[in-house]
Image (spheres, helix red, strand yellow):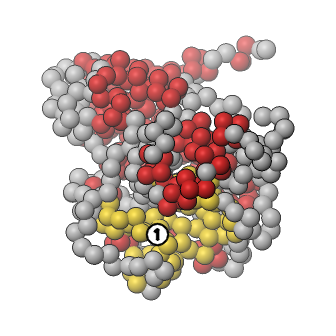
Amino acid sequence: MSEHHHDHDHDHSELSETELRVRALETILTEKGYVEPAALDAIIQAYETKIGPHNGARVVAKAWTDPAFKKALLEDGSKAIGTLGHVSRVGDHLVVVENTPERHNMVVCTLCSCYPWEMLGLPPVWYKAAPYRSRAVKDPRGVLADFDVTLPKDMEIRVWDSTAETRFLVLPMRPAGTEGWSEEQLAELVTRDSMIGTGFPRTPGAPS
Amino acid sequence: MNGVHDMGGMDGFGKVEPEPNEPVFHAHWEERVLAMVRAMGAAGAFNIDTSRFYRETLPPHVYLSSSYYKKWFLGLEEMLIEKGYLTREEVAAGHAMQPGKALKHGKFDLTQVERIMVRGKFARPAPAPAKFDIGDRVRAKNIHPVTHTRLPRYVRGHVGVVELNHGCHVFPDTAAMERGEHPQWLYTVVFEGRDLWGEDGDPTLKVSIDAFEPYLDPA
């Protein structure tokens, strides 16, 4: 490794300036009595440990094994997930959209970065960046190619632009060769990208 | 506003670059920015629409050249100054120089954390019956407000079909400008890809937006 590989946060002057400004803002907000730093720590910890794609994966695996749950989930995502209790608390207006052999769904927020945080955690950088936001609604197959994903030529592709406080989660198709698998085993196959619509679940037996 | 944030359909930004094993945050300061935005929003210093508007009003070159959390930081700082929660002198000094302004929901402390891990509620009682039914053809209005709106440019003037009715929700166009919630019916409206992008568009593509009733005319 050359010397150029140390932590860029510390040796890049622009980032250092940002770090200083962020620190100053937190000092001011704390001194003025607006926020408690320990409460900020707790928010960060929750996003780093509790909230993530494992929540969505459990919902998807449940839908793959329980037809009544799947029906309820597609009718009212928030309500159905609320009945699970143990997965994650979820706010209003989560809309779950189902992939079928005829239709592939993909979710974007062209205007900012709306994303089902409670199900998937904080969005990845690419989801919030210009290439994805600009191209997903116009050339989704080109975007999928960037993920090495190819759809059948005639398959309908439906892009959901999250322009309001509704949130969308894709219910991917259950992989073949998983008959008799438990929910826990199935959840291991469900990737974050398969719930955004930029990927598929893992194939049984393939390296993860 | 017709800002660079309204990116749907723009060309030239290059390939999407997924990052294998991406961490939740890429730097410590990003965590603090996320937490401060969530905390000050929850304390009542601003609503989610106002915070979006402050990011959208960053100068285009700043918006395009700043990382995601840098945009959040710049929007937050400016918003808190303009709303009177801190002063430019304090920002320059890096310390508080006068007492804080009262927050609608009080100081954000540890007891508040649990409640913000679930999204807020944006549904409101309906002030009037819905104008559109599922299956109705509607045209997205050709409007260009200089203030906040959630009607993306790429659908304006185009005809789509109402697919879902989500009930009445807080209207971002007024909420962002602190002119009240003015709840409006919210619909998923689906457009044919070729109607949006012309004959060269992907014939298998359909695109939907969630549109508030004032964005739509019967078609």
Residue appearing at x 23%, y 30% in the figure: B86
Residue appearing at x 44%, y 45% in the figure: A82
Decide if residue B84 is on the left or right side of residue B160.
left
| Helix, strand or loop at mark 1 | strand
Q: Is residue B96 visible?
A: yes
Residue at the far bottom: name it: B219
User: Which quadrant of the view contains residue A137?
Assistant: bottom right
Q: Amino acid at mark 1?
A: Leu
**Quadrant location of the C terminus of chain A?**
top right
Residue appearing at x 45%, y 77% in the figure: B134
In depth, the one of B80 and B32 nearer the eye is: B32
User: Which quadrant of the view contains residue B51?
Assistant: top left
Residue B73 in the image, given as x and y percentages of width and height:
41, 34
Q: Is residue B152 visible?
A: no
Please report, as a chain letter, where disc 1 is located. Answer: B
- Identify the residue under disc 1: B164
Decide if residue A122 is on the left or right side of residue A27.
right
Residue B39 in the image, given as x and y percentages of width and height:
33, 31
Residue A163 in the image, given as x and y percentages of width and height:
46, 59
In depth, the one of A92 and B107 nearer the eye is: A92
Q: Is residue A55 above or below residue B113?
A: below
What is the crowding at mark 1: few (fewer than 14 residues within 10 Å), some, or many (at least 20)? some
In depth, the one of A180 and B53 nearer the eye is: A180
